[in-house]
Image (cartoon, rainbow, N blue to C red):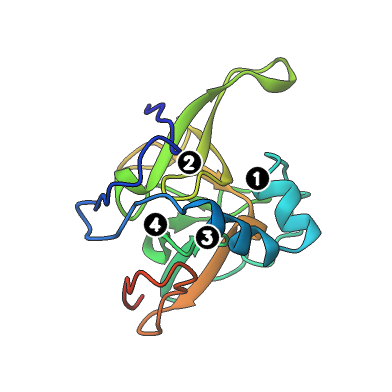
Amino acid sequence: MTDIDLSDSRAPRRSSAGYDLTPPDDQERARLEADLNPEEKRVLLSHGTEAPFCGTLLGEKRAGVFCCRECGLPLFRSRTKFESGTGWPSFTEPVDPAHVHEVRDTSYGMIRIETLCARCGSHQGHVFPDGPPPTGNRYCINSVALTFVPEGEPLPDPLRRGDGNA
């Protein structure tokens, strides 16, 4: 579990997968947040949860990448997605461990591990130790927190970082 202050540095950082993890500056963040609808703001910015079995990406089975809805960072590959029966898209591992920050969440009288986008800090969901092999993890993620990009198509690039294709 990593507990990192995402606002402390503007120095460029790259993940081992080659993606720019530099947090957005204040102007970029304002632009990204202005592009979110009310439900996306509630989940991504206020740590909300969408209703189970309602997310548009729950049944997505095409090859591709699931990216952060706010900043476009690739978070999960479709080959790691599995049917958990929980009502939210579930994955066994991130594209790169550096793309997802994990923080202890004690809200609602529970102890859980919250997952945040490592670049913009937006709430994605939670990770639980009850997933299938090979990792045993279940990243339970809100559909509204993600954008799906079919394999071979350009990744969303709202920060103009040129991060490539799915």
Query: In the rendered structure, which amino acid carries the disc numbered 4?
Result: Thr
Q: Secondary structure at mark 3?
A: helix
Query: In the rendered structure, which amino acid carries the disc numbered 2?
Result: Arg
- For this view, does 51 lie left or right of residue 111? right
Q: Secondary structure at mark 2?
A: strand
x%, y% of residue 41? 72, 53
Q: Are marks 2 and 1 in contact (CB under 8 Å)?
A: yes
> Mark 2 to mark 1: distance in Å?
10 Å
Precedes in sequence: disc 4 or disc 2? 4
Q: Which residue is mark 2?
A: 138
Packing grade of label 3 (10 A; few <14, some 14-19, many >=20) is: some
Q: Which residue is mark 4?
A: 80
Precedes in sequence: disc 1 or disc 3? 3
Q: How many marks do you count on the picture?
A: 4
Precedes in sequence: disc 4 or disc 1? 4
> Mark 3 to mark 4: distance in Å?
30 Å
Packing grade of label 1 (10 A; few <14, some 14-19, many >=20) is: few
x%, y% of residue 82? 48, 55
- Between 129 and 156, the one lying in front of the other is 156
> Mark 4 to mark 1: distance in Å?
16 Å
Query: In the rendered structure, which amino acid carries the disc numbered 1?
Result: Thr
Label drawn at residue 28: 3
Q: Which residue is mark 1?
A: 86
Q: Are marks 3 and 4 in contact (CB under 8 Å)?
A: no
Query: In the rendered structure, which amino acid carries the disc numbered 3?
Result: Glu
Precedes in sequence: disc 3 or disc 2? 3
